[in-house]
Image (spheres, rainbow, N blue to C red):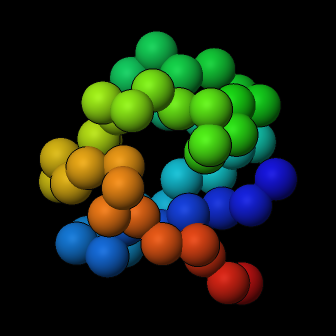
Amino acid sequence: MKKYICPGCQYIYDPAVGDPDGGIPAGTAFEDLPDDWVCPVCGLAKDEFEEYEE
């Protein structure tokens, strides 16, 4: 599964980790996040995230 990065604060959403504080379990693909999910660090909307190239 691909990782995605927040252009606002550089937070990286890693599907292997999920967003436990936001109630998103590990193994949740970015595409499967709720449409109203936001960056847990700066609050930027999901649709602002960009694919992360390692």
Asked whether 51 or 22 is in front, the reply is 51
Please report the residue visible at 53 percent of the width from the left and 32 percent of the height from the top: 33
Spot occupied by residue 30 in the image (x, y as percentages of width and height): 61, 45
Residue that extends furthest to the right in the rendered view of this protein: 1
Is residue 4 in view from this perspective?
A: yes
Please report the residue visible at 29 percent of the width from the left and 41 percent of the height from the top: 38
Label count reads: 0
Asked whether 5 or 46 is in front, the reply is 46
Please report the residue visible at 39 percent of the width from the left and 23 percent of the height from the top: 22
- 52 left or right, relative to 21: right
Residue that extends furthest to the bottom in the rendered view of this protein: 54
- 39 left or right, relative to 50: left
Image quadrant where residue 4 sits: bottom right
- 49 left or right, relative to 54: left
Please report the residue visible at 64 percent of the width from the left and 51 percent of the height from the top: 14
Is residue 39 in view from this perspective?
A: no
Asked whether 33 or 54 is in front, the reply is 33
Location of residue 37 with respect to 31 vertically, above or below: above
Spot occupied by residue 18 in the image (x, y as percentages of width and height): 60, 35
